[in-house]
Image (cartoon, helix red, strand yellow):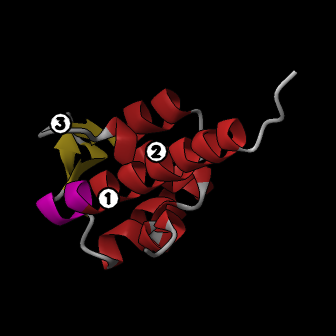
């Protein structure tokens, strides 16, 4: 059986990209400023994360205007939600296998 770390998605190995995808759970679409404030990231880091995830097809970006001000909205795609689900399952499997190994390897008192 392969170690669950092989199921981790490299796209989510940075905290900003993982946080971004977690914030976009379901069919929610958030504007850039809301997303930035929600995950407590600076503009540059968030912009880079969005660009990376958009290239992978994990998010979609919509640009428009609200009262003559430019706005950017971001939403996760079905592909991105599936990838995040696999990644989270792998993280759980890793942490659970560590607990099982730890309890199996303890010496009796």
Above or below — where is 19 with respect to 107?
Answer: below
The reply to whether dot 1 and dot 3 touch (C-beta < 8 Å) is no
- In this rendered view, identify the residue nearer to me: 8 or 79: 8
Q: Which residue is mark 2?
A: 92
In this rendering, position of residue 24 left or right of residue 39 = left
Q: Secondary structure at mark 1?
A: helix
The mark lying in front, picked from 1 and 2, is: 2
Q: Position of residue 58 (x, y in %)?
A: 27, 65
Q: Quadrant of the N terminus?
A: bottom left
Gap between marks 3 and 2 measured at Cα? 24 Å
The rendered magenta stretch, by its main secondary structure, is classed as helix
Closer to the N terminus: mark 3 or mark 2? 3
- In this rendered view, identify the residue nearer to me: 41 or 1: 1
**Farthest residue, direction right:** 109
Residue density around tag 3, few if under 14, some if 14–19, many if 20 or more, within 10 Å: few
Residue density around tag 1, few if under 14, some if 14–19, many if 20 or more, within 10 Å: some
Residue drawn at (16%, 39%) of the image: 26
Could you say which disc has been placed on residue 28 in the image? 3
Q: Secondary structure at mark 3?
A: loop
The boundaries of the magenta stretch are 78-82
The reply to whether dot 1 and dot 2 touch (C-beta < 8 Å) is no
The reply to whether dot 3 and dot 2 touch (C-beta < 8 Å) is no
Above or below — where is 2 with respect to 16?
Answer: below
Whether residue 61 is visible, yes or no, is no
Residue drawn at (23%, 41%) of the image: 68
Whether residue 58 is visible, yes or no, is yes
Q: Secondary structure at mark 2?
A: helix
Gap between marks 1 and 3 measured at Cα? 20 Å
Could you say which disc has been placed on residue 98 in the image? none
Residue density around tag 2, few if under 14, some if 14–19, many if 20 or more, within 10 Å: few
Q: Quadrant of the C terminus?
A: top right
Could you say which disc has been placed on residue 86 in the image? 1
């Amino acid at each position: 059986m392969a170690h669950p770390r092989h199921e981790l998605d490299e796209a989510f190995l940075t905290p900003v990209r993982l946080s971004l995808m977690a914030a976009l759970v379901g069919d929610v679409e958030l504007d850039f400023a809301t997303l930035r404030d929600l995950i407590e990231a600076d503009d540059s880091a968030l912009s880079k994360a969005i660009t990376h995830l958009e290239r992978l097809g994990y998010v979609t970006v919509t640009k428009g205007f609200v009262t003559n001000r430019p706005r950017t909205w971001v939403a996760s795609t079905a592909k991105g939600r599936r990838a995040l689900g696999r990644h989270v399952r792998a993280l759980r499997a890793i942490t659970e296998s560590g607990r099982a190994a730890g309890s199996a390897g303890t010496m009796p008192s």
